[in-house]
Image (spheres, rainbow, N blue to C red):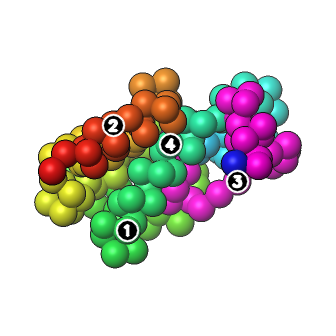
Amino acid sequence: MENLHILVGGKTNGGLKAKQGTLLHMSPEMLVYASDIDDEDKAFSTRIGRASDIWSVGCTVLEMVGRGQFQYKTADGTIIVDSSNKMKSFKQVENGAYFDQSDAKTRLGSELSHILAECLRKEAEKRPRVAGLARLVQAVGGRS
């Protein structure tokens, strides 16, 4: 909690100018940023903030539930095998690709898989905020 002051402004870069991360954990808005790095006006207008961190939380949960494995599916349900190329990943997400959450639904149950789905919403503004996410998790955890 000693670094709580870093979170106050709605951004979590800790004063760092570079925005980067694990490709598979990059939010759609981060992929936009990464793909437009040569177009400074567009890249810097891409809002990266806590919603991107919420996306990464969802990715981390998916990775834990899937024992280190999780995949994107295209809009028609085809599994994407190669997600190592940022531009290709961005184009696929832009065209409707999404994380396959079927394994998580089986392992987590309906309430937790709903929370996971909220974290992985394509639109950053529709993802829960940190406090809302904490309330959702506490509500599920408080039931016996």
Discs 2, 1 touching: Cβ within 8 Å: no
Q: Of the residues under marks 1 and 4, which one precedes in the sequence?
A: 4
Residue 99 visible somewhere in the drawing: yes
Left or right, 12 with reference to 95: right
Discs 1, 3 touching: Cβ within 8 Å: no
Q: Position of residue 52 (x, y in %)?
A: 56, 41
Nearer to the camera, 76 or 103: 103
Nearer to the camera, 55 or 128: 128
Q: CA distance from mark 1 to mark 3?
A: 21 Å
Badge 3: residue crowd in 10 Å (few <14, some 14–19, many ≥20): few
Q: What residue does disc 1 label?
A: 64
Left or right, 73 with reference to 33: left
Q: What residue does disc 3 label?
A: 20
Query: In the image as oriented, which residue stretches furthest toward the bottom?
Result: 67
Q: Amino acid under label 3?
A: Gln
Q: Which residue is located at x 34 percent, y 42 percent?
A: 138
Q: Position of residue 61 (x, y in %)?
A: 39, 59
Q: Is residue 39 above or below residue 66?
A: above
